[in-house]
Amino acid sequence: MTNMWMVRAGKNAFLIDEFKENNIVAIGWGLGNLKDKSKEEIEELVYEKYPNKTKNQNTIIVAQEYKFLKDIKKGDYVLSYNPGTRNYLLGKITSNYYFSDIISKTLDDDDYSDVRNVKWLDDIPRDKLNISTKNTLGAISTLFNINNEAKKDILNIFEGKESGDDSGEDSILVDEIEEKSKEFIKDIVNSLEGYEMQDLVAALLRAMGYKTIVSTPGPDRGRDIIASPDGLGLENPVIVVEVKHRSQTMSAPNIRSFKGALKKTNKGIYVSTGGFTSEAKYEAERSEIPIILMDLDRLVKFIMQYYDNFDADGRSLLPLKKIYWPIK
């Protein structure tokens, strides 16, 4: 089966005109001529060239160089995106790998000396593609293999056929991205130290309009954070927060112990990144003093809801970037 590959034209596609004019695609990380090199030899060159990159970064470079060298075949389809025109250049690979200085300009340390010749066939407007195909082509890797569904959609456009119907796919995509972003945030939150978790929960409460007092390290008698409108605990509601940042699931005795330290006029929040047993949830539900149980998932949902109001201290613990998504 003929493969289709995306080969990006450098950062922000600054080489797209050279790709088109010279009938090529090119990548390169300054490793020299890789013809006849094994994957192990490429790996040695990468680690020698980039000793300060992470293992994961170097692994990606090795994989992409090896794909360009060995996996791409003559006759395979290739795409490269031009964000200025919102078109994808579609072509076919016409040569094996070769080493060349044909690329005359660079914006970074990469030398783009690993080259394949291409016969460019057509421009494929992005606006004509399925949403699922657009999502596939949105991957940021320099080089990757395009799946069969996206390839079929692209070739349909090239052959003058209609793109398949994927109505409703955009809402599914939004849901997937939101769920992925939540899981990534949970990964970061879960990696915090215990005292950092206390500070993060306090930052959330401040974002919700309360003033907080965070306990110093040491015995706190179930009072990691005190939150209130005045910051002194004199004005109601006074919220007492216990934060348990550990893998163990909190049980009913933990909730009873927490409840025993509360005054009748208090409100309680028990944060456990390890979650709660069903008995613990029942214990909180039947408590005469209001107690909210907050596991990692619920904590992150509240963080996402109130993050716009986070102060500098909270944002430094959990730096997040807002993205904008069109609403239809």
Image: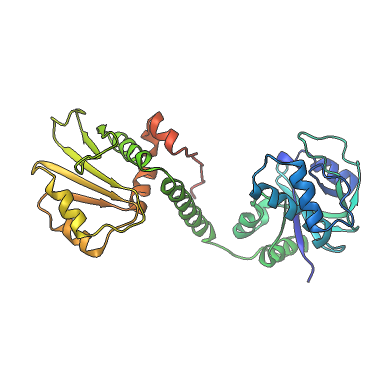
Q: Which is more toward the observer, 256 or 227?
A: 256
Q: Identify the residue shown where x is 51% and y is 42%.
A: 324
Along the viewing direction, whichever of 41 and 308 lies nearer the viewer: 41
User: Where residue 39 sits: x, y (%)?
Assistant: 79, 58
Which residue is at a point 13% across and 35% down the rendered structure image? 236
Where in the figure is residue 204, as x and y percent of width and height? 33, 39
Q: Is residue 89 at least partly visible in the picture?
A: no
Residue 310 vs 98, above or below: the answer is above
Report whether residue 51 is seen: yes
Tell me what residue is drawn at x 70 percent, y 48 percent.
58
Q: Is residue 151 left or right of residue 244?
A: right
- Dividing the picture into quadrants, the one containing residue 305 is top left
Q: Is residue 21 above or below residue 206?
A: below
Residue 207 in the image: state x and y as whole percent. 32, 35
Residue 272 at x, y = what percent? 30, 51
Q: How is the image coloured?
A: rainbow
Q: Is residue 266 left or right of residue 300?
A: left
How many numbered markers are drawn? Answer: 0
Q: Please state if 150 lies on the left or on the right of 159 as rendered.
A: left
Image quadrant where one finds the N terminus: bottom right
Up-down relation of residue 11 to residue 134 (above or below): above
Residue sitting at the far front: 218
**Please, which residue is most extreme toward the bottom here?**
1
Instruction: Identify which residue, 126 or 316, lies in the foreground.
Output: 316
